[in-house]
Image (cartoon, grey):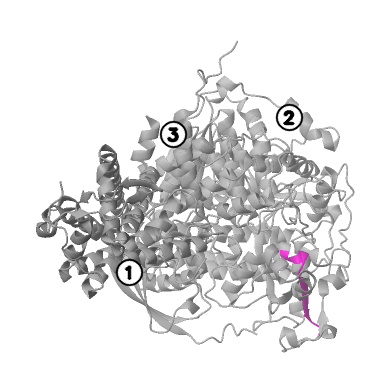
Amino acid sequence: MATLNSKIPTGPLAEKWRKHKTEIKLVNPANKRKYEVIVVGAGLAGASAASSLADLGYKVKCFVFHDSPRRAHSIAAQGGINAAKNYQNDGDSVHRLFYDTLKGGDYRAREANVHRLAEVSVNIIDQCVAQGVPFAREYGGLLANRSFGGAQVSRTFYARGQTGQQLLLGAYSALSRTVGAGAVDLHTNSEMLDLVVVNGQAKGVIIRNLVTGVISRHSADAVILATGGYGNVFNLSTYARGSNTTAIWRAYKRGACMANPCYTQIHPTCIPVSGDYQSKLTLMSESLRNDGRIWAPKKSGDARTAADIPESDRDYFLERLYPSFGNLAPRDIASRAAKRVCDEGRGVGTTGLGVYLDFADAIGRLGEPAVRERYGNLFDIYHEITAENAYKAPMRIYPAVHYTMGGLWVDYNLMSNIPGLFVLGEANFSDHGANRLGASALMQGLADGYFVIPYTVGDYLAGQKSGSRPSTDGAEFKQAEDNVRGLSNRLLATKGKQPVSYFHKKLGKIIWDHCGMSRTKAGLESALQKIPALREEFNATVNVPGSAETLNQSLEKAGRVADFIELGELMCRDALTREESCGGHFREEHQEADGECKRDDQNFAHVAAWEYQGDSKSPLRNTEPLNYEFTKMSVRNYK
Amino acid sequence: MNLVCNLFGSSIGRKFIMALTGLVLIGFVFGHLVGNLQVFAHPDKINGYAHFLHSLGPVLWLVRIGLLVCVGLHIWAATVLTLESRRARGSEPYGVKTWIQAVFASRYIRWSGYVVLGFILYHLAHFTVGVAQAGTYKTALPAHTLTSDYHVLGFTVVPAGTRVHDVHQMVVLGFQPPLVSLFYIVAVGLLSLHLLHGMDSLFQTLGWRNASWSRSLRTVVTLLCVAYFAGSLVIPGAVLTGALKPAPAVKTASAQ
Amino acid sequence: MVAVNTQKLFSVTLRVWRQAGPAQPGKFVEYPAKDLNPNMSFLEMLDVVNDELAAQGIEPIAFAHDCREGICGTCSCTINGKPHGPGKGVATCQTYMRSFSDGDTIVVEPFRARAFPVIKDLVIDRAAFDKIQQAGGFITARAGSAPEANALPIAKGDADLAMDAAQCIGCGACVAACKNASAMLFVSAKVSHLGLLPQGQAERDRRVLAMVNTMDALGFGSCTNQYECSAACPKLISHDFIARMNRDYVKASFRSAFKAAPANTSGGGA
């Protein structure tokens, strides 16, 4: 049984991080270069961590599976990044950002972590501006803000509809600087396939070079995973096709606990599915909800075009249900409302799985040029994909999988239950509880990488003897490498009939149907029957052509889908055990009369951290209680 | 020295050299054309002009050497950049490659350059050195006595009565063979095309061009190139059509 | 409403570059792509073809892709002679089959340039771009040292222009489209993005000199001002940035030659 000590510092909430920083151990500058740290992934969290640690003087090795660290999927975040700067003079503060984030997460995150996030949010903006991130500005030259879901203040900083791109390129430039200076040893096209644990501590990784197929061992004093979320378990999602769970899943199989895997975020404003060939769902930024109004016909089965439906027959359901937040209700709430409308037969488009996001009012109020200035690139994306002009007819949108709040369990120092294994960004579970607010993912990724890990990794390394990194010739490294080779050999040797995509689609459908926007006991139980059967089928009939010695995209996919199948099972298990509704986890059995989430704080105010027990055994469910010392767990109310 | 390395060793430096030398050469070809258009005036004009230029002595040689250096550097930069660019393209060509928007003049800048080089060599042999068509070279023709003063900036530089080479006659006679004139017309056509891309391009290379005025620049450049072509066309054109005839041979003695 | 699933299906022939590895010779091979929905993306069409190839025991076509929403810059095919296909201002992943007609033969090749060697089939190695960035594509600002963000106002026009340049996704289409395989648009976008901002002034000369000289050393060609790069760019980044970089480079060359240099650049002290 894993010990889950959250190591939350004592003292008043607002003092915890400051106090912790003064109390944790330091490594002196001359000794830092004697420690080697492996960073896996170079998205916002990974790139910022690698460059910051290198700047401190640690030897850093960074592995990315992409051909360049600039490709990580952080790049696709559109809307913005939150920070409690209060530049708008609208009453924002660190405490308010903390409170909004905690409440948005439906009181399933740690108070101390969330408060720290809100505190460092202001430093992130300073840091990014200093790096040359071209945030939007007012005519006077000062930074502009916009509002986002789940908040009643304007605290979101943005760079057109490409904020994630600009922040990632900022972090990438810092990483490039340190690579150029020889302080980071960067390995591209390098996928982590196993974690090496020596004497109970994370001391290395096994890497496959995706271009040459060469498998190599790397040892270090600490290992940092910043490998992103696992939303591609649904197959169709707004994730990049390459986003995967493999790194954290293999760490899970080495003993790291997986926390709250059932907490997944369904984003309300995505372009609806058009056919079964589809590989990807495209997000329309939440910022559109600032000016767009969401509606559906009042009557079910209304086949008229949007233009032919008069005002009196339209239901602006978010404004009706949540008058104080209206179209800016949090993502989980907006998504479920759209689903309910479609379930009632009021959905639009040929599939009936869609609602309108209408800009007619905004165009009337501001004029088309102003709308184009704010959202032009999003309208263009919509046009490319659907061949429809959203300036003339409303967009059709439907919820899609967008983010996973669950991830590897970490303590306040972002270290997992395996000492020496740190997990940052979306790959960990720490800050968003059961639902993430818009513009908070970028904030968390950069907070972890720039402002948390540089302190906390030192605290761990100070306790390690410098030069004590194990040799890669050790038994643990050999065993891990054999494990990796065995896995890919098995996949190549199966020589079945079904392409990997067949399994991924099938898995995605099971998870979407039973562990998606709403979940039931019966549905989850049936999923827990179907997934092991799918795994059997995969093992017996998957077709992976080619060899392991060259670039083999089928082999890469097969390994990732195999992990998704196992993870999917754990997600369903977690969702089944969590007999309550909270945030993105909605159990139909647990709802209020009006269809809202019904939390059970008595029995489920805890983190569920699953511990691997072997392939043939059920995993162990550990819990970390969530103690709310400073905030009252209340019912989320956006009405 | 870093500056020399950057200017002669880097792609941008070489482009800079190309643009600067191009700018000098553009100035030359336009000045040269304007000077030559004096052929349409009384023979005193162009003959006095030619005599004045020759009377500059070392200054003329300085200008000539300067121009030759510019031509040399322009060609050197073009050659080095072309060779590097070919190498950069790689050994495996595209199976299919389409142009997206490059203007016609830019696609054939190298070819127009080659022809222009050939033309310059012939032109120098023809009118400057007198190797080609030696029979109608100025030294083989009777001298011309100026009937009026030749002025530059209001100063008389060649007084009336001076006996000078008859350049007017040389030009008219030189263009009388239709093949020579046709080659000349084709070459100045290509030179205009070369300038059409080159003039626009040098603003880009020197970093002066941007979208807010690039259309105006393009229009001005196009008008200049058309004017250049028209101006260069009328001299052989007038000779061919008989509009420009050799002056009656009134002077008999040769120049000093 | 758009009838999404009732579109008439159609078929095309793909003429695809197949190359087993960097050192092996490649060739074009034809494959049929049948029953395509016009709303499919080009890459989804390749997915379908690949599954069919795998079922026939043929190794699937390797192609680079990731985000499939035009922002990561991973996808990189030259389609019918144009990088990223027929659309203007879109990447291959944003190219939809509705751009093609029944019976078309579509020629699909990798981006070609000496500095972008082919790894396999349509996948190329663009590490050269990273190396250029590492040479100087940054503003040195260690985490923790940044001043208050609003302490330095930046005119909206400058910030917007910097953003225009900063949009580059690093796909390499500019190099692929250029007859000289020049990387000027890519490099100038980064040089201009950082050079337009006040934060970027301290390293401005150093940056442009280092990035351009690295670009040259990596074997990219030079710019002949044909602007095929900006026309092929999925973000339509303007070649005006190239002009800006040309000016910056020459200025920096002169400044570095004539500026007084400090006698001692090291720290030292007690």
Name the kind of residue labelled 1 in the image: Val
Which residue corresponds to the image point at 55% horizontal and 44% vertical from the top-left?
A172
- Chain letter for the residue marked with disc 2 in the picture: A
The quadrant in which residue A233 appears is bottom right
Name the kind of residue labelled 3 in the image: Thr
Residue nearest the viewer, comparing A515 with A19: A19
Q: Within 10 Å of the Cα at label 1, are there few (<14), some (14-19), or many (20+) other Cα atoms?
A: few
Task: Name the spot of residue A293 as percent of width and height, x first.
Answer: 78, 72
The quadrant of the picture occupied by the N terminus of chain A is: top right
Task: Name the spot of residue B227 as percent of width and height, x first.
Answer: 38, 65
**In the rendered view, does C247 fall on the left or right side of B111?**
right
User: Where does label 1 land, which residue?
Assistant: B96
Give the alpha-carbon distance from disc 2 to disc 3, as whole Å: 33 Å
Give the alpha-carbon distance from disc 2 to disc 1, as whole Å: 61 Å
Give the alpha-carbon distance from disc 1 to disc 3, as whole Å: 49 Å
**In the rendered view, does C246 fall on the left or right side of B242?**
right
User: What are the residue bounds of the magenta stretch?
Assistant: A288-298
Residue A277 position (above or below residue B7): below
Residue A21's disc is: 2
Indicate the secondary structure of the residue bearing disc 3.
loop
Residue nearest the viewer, comparing A246 with A392: A392
**In the rendered view, does B3 fall on the left or right side of C87?**
left
